[in-house]
Amino acid sequence: MNKKRVMLWRAACAVVLVLGILLPATSALAHDLDNSDEYIDIIVEYTKNPPAEEDLDPSFKNVETLTVAPIQMMTVPSSSVKDISLMENVSRITYDQIVYKSDSSITHSSRSDNWNQDMIGTFDAWDEGVTGQGVKVAVLDTGFNRDHNDISFTGGHSVFESSNWYEDHDGHGTHVAGIIGANQNSPAAGTAPGVELYGVKIFDKEETTSISNLLNGLNWAIDNNMDIISLSSGYENENPAVHAVIKIAESSGILVVAASGNIKDSSNTDVDFPAAHSEVIAVSNLDSNRSIVSDSKRGEQNELAAPGLQILGLGIDGPDSFRTMSGTSQATPHVAGIAALLMQKYPEESAAQIRARMAEKARDLGEEGRDPIYGYGLVHYLPEQMEEPESEEDVEDGPTEEDDTESDSDDDTETEDGITDEDTDENGNGEEQDSEEIDDTESPQDDLEDDSSPEEEPAEDQESEDGQDDASDADEEEEPLQSTVWIRPSEMNGMAVIDGEDLEAVADNGLLAISFDSSLEYIERVNLTPEQVESIRSRNITLLIVRIDMEWVIPAANLTEGEAFLSFETVQEPLDYSETAHSDLIDFSIEQNDQIITSFPEQMTYRFFTEQAEANQHQLYEWNTDQEEWILLGDTYTNSAVVGQTASVATMAVFDPIELEAAILSSEEPEEIEEVTEEPEEESEEDETEESTRASFGDGDSELPVVLVGGLVILTSVGGGFYFFGGKPKQ
């Protein structure tokens, strides 16, 4: 029985020892497996043809490839983004972001059902027999009620496999499409009822959609040779992929019209994208008095204005249903409709010529010439000189007695948000005179602070729709992803440079990741122009230098005015003990105004990637030039990297601390031996033996090395020796 117990105990000891050795590595492996990546939606732009979808990593989901541009949308593990950015063919990676409908909750009483069409000269076009016939218009929106009796669609497309283009769960798309193409005899007649109308569904049941869905819709419209694309939606931060596709649309002869957007809170009054792109006609929103609606966004990108407040349009509750809606969403299709009328009237003119003609025909409002509120002015079918003389006289002579009360009412009842409750005259007179007075009293909101926290509650209360508030909350949750852009830099004079568009694509307080793939590994310097540095500092953009073996995070506050050079050069000259390093020795530096800056107001993060950094307990060290020694910088780990933080730059490398200490001790041994050689030979030999014993077993005050102890345990428990349970030597 005793022998069996002894054997069982020996086996147990052996198992414990083996587990003690293996558990750290096993735990690290289990940690990696348990912390599986969160999947995120990204947009990848390539320098040439994208890879075949079947050749991508099988873990990538929902991969879609555009046919008009080298762009792919996909859902990937978050840790894969860096690896994708290091592919030689990848030029830029952006995170998918939210796109909103450009509708508004502001209300206003109108003179008649079709006051909006009367204001822009629609009926004059019809009198000439011009209805937009033969012009192909694509409306990208929430879906379309093709069963409504007052509209006909030529065709459509849905970017969703789960729903058809003619399913409209919201009503926004049906309403917008009706403003363009509803029948002439409808109570909510469209501007160009003769167009070939195509409904492209890019919103599903949610209040918002994504950049990926917008890209798919644009791709379809370009592939199917549309003449006009109408977009009543937008997003706050520029997306280079969308811009690239819109440039393709423009070069293909397609006129793109988009909503400038509505002010949802005081933090952002800038024109939304894609309307803010120069290739797009940005449309602001007017009421029936030709005055800007208070929540219409302001900016130099605004090109034309159109009616968009309380517009009667088609509904989704049946074949004869109608509803009123407001916003730059409703203003946009009026401009698209006028463009269609002019394309029919001037079939030989290009989209660019039609655009110029529209600017020329616009009724100048506000400041003389183009301004940030009205752009060139109210869109109109007829040249201004052909307008009825009464309207011009009314503008010059000021308000009539009949309308004086209306104007006073406007001034008295306008709230802080700019909402008016005037009762207008049903005969339609006095539109422009009211516009003059209201324009004088309503001040643009351009001076609102841009640095307001996006987390503050909206300034509007009852005017904000619940759906819009929910969408705003969703945007806040997604902001960290939307604020990051990964780019592949260009090379100039042996240094990396970035495009202005790359920097513009990053949101304020965002991050620009400059990724160096294997083909760029010889570049060890980034050059930033003074203008780029100023943009980075003023918008608080963090820089991330990315290589396969390291990452360097630089806060905007660490840059000063002027040109900047960010260096991360591999050190060729060896430093002490560099032969034991587990990484390249990299010298980090920042040069501005011909000076190397060594200390900074904020800490910078350095990440070095080595094989099994955490399992091997690698640590990050920096070289102290004054003391000429390696100083521990970081011993924490994240995403397979060892991480350190400091408010300075230095030469850095990764070491195994045990190996580094051994190398240091080894370098000190010759000095000790040299001192000993002065003594008699016998003592030297004894000291040598003692040193050898110390090197093998450690100092007398230290414990035996763990591995040696483990070996002894195995030998004594399995192979013989003493056992101590009975206090007797083994027989």
Image (cartoon, grey):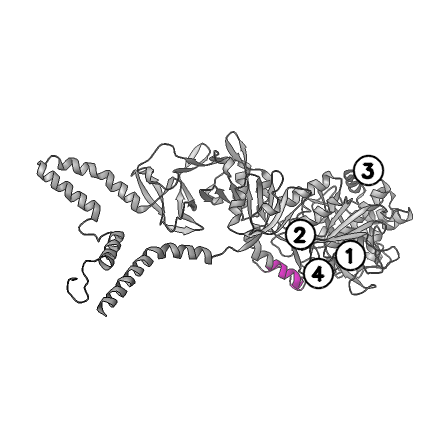
- Judge the density around disc 3: few (<14), some (14-19), many (≥20) Cα neighbours within 10 Å: some
Q: Secondary structure at mark 1?
A: helix
Residue 213 has which mark?
2
**Region in magenta:** 457-473
Q: Nearer the viewer, residue 357 or 99?
A: 99
Residue 407 has which mark?
1
The answer to whether 112 appears left or right of 601 in the picture is: right
The mark closer to the camera, 1 or 3, is: 3
The mark closer to the camera, 2 or 4, is: 2
- What kind of residue is marked 2? Asn
Q: State the count of labels.
A: 4
Residue 591 visible here: yes
Q: Nearer the viewer, residue 326 or 706?
A: 706
Residue 454 visible here: no
The disc, 3 or 2, on the residue closer to the chain's N-terminal end is 2
Image quadrant assignment for residue 250: top right
| Residue 464 part of the magenta-drawn span | yes
Q: Secondary structure at mark 4?
A: loop
Q: Nearer the viewer, residue 188 or 638?
A: 638
Residue 349 has which mark?
3
Contact between labelled residues 4 and 1, with CB atoms less than 8 Å apart = no
- What kind of residue is marked 1? Ser
Residue bearing mark 4: 105
- Judge the density around disc 1: few (<14), some (14-19), many (≥20) Cα neighbours within 10 Å: many
- 3D distance between C-alphas at marks 1 and 4: 23 Å
The residue located at (52%, 29%) in the rendering is 493
Please identify the quadrant where the N terminus is shown: bottom left
Contact between labelled residues 1 and 2, with CB atoms less than 8 Å apart = no
The mark closer to the camera, 1 or 4, is: 4
